[in-house]
Amino acid sequence: MGQRSMTEDRWPASWLRGVLEVAVLAALVDGESYGYALAQRLSRAGLGKVSGNTLYPVLARLEASGAVSSRWTEGDGGPGRKFYAITKSGRQRLATDGEDWERFASATITLVSEARTNSGGNRSDGTRT
């Protein structure tokens, strides 16, 4: 894989899948929101572009589990919007999953940092990078 920057618009899908539920819950802590605004919030947070095809199934799973609730509102001259809000159960899940995610991310950072430092720029086949 080539070099990536923190401002890159798209992370590998497998990384996003691993963190998206907890990220959506975190994005809803400040108040209810609708899908497009949530996607923008996640993008501003540095997760890159999150498509509706990725976001809406996550919201449906979170709603089915009771972590979020939803309500429809009429649109101003356009279609209505479905707003999502974090529930008490969702806040509890965010606390637990958020703590677990932080430990997991920290362990990953430590492992990768140690490997990069110890490799001295050498690839696993012994050649220099």
Image (spheres, helix red, strand yellow):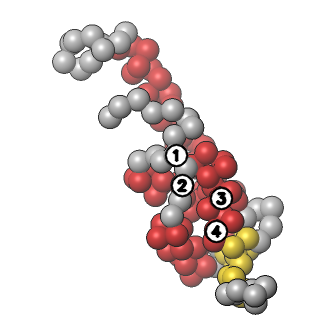
Image position, residue 49 (x, y; %): 54, 55
- The kind of residue on which mark 2 rests is Lys
Q: Earlier in the sequence, mark 3 or mark 2?
A: 3
Q: Quadrant of residue 78?
A: bottom right
Q: Which residue is mark 1?
A: 9
Q: CA–CA distance between discs 2 and 4? A: 11 Å
Q: Which residue is mark 4?
A: 36
| Residue 64 shows in this picture | yes
Q: Quadrant of residue 26?
A: bottom right
Cβ atoms at labels 1 and 4 below 8 Å apart:
no
Cβ atoms at labels 4 and 3 below 8 Å apart:
yes
Image position, residue 88 (x, y; %): 75, 72
Task: Please name the residue shown 76% across and 62% down the image.
Answer: 29
Looking at the rendered structure, the secondary structure element under dot 1 is loop
Q: Which residue is mark 2?
A: 49
Looking at the rendered structure, the secondary structure element under dot 4 is helix
Q: Which residue is mark 3?
A: 40
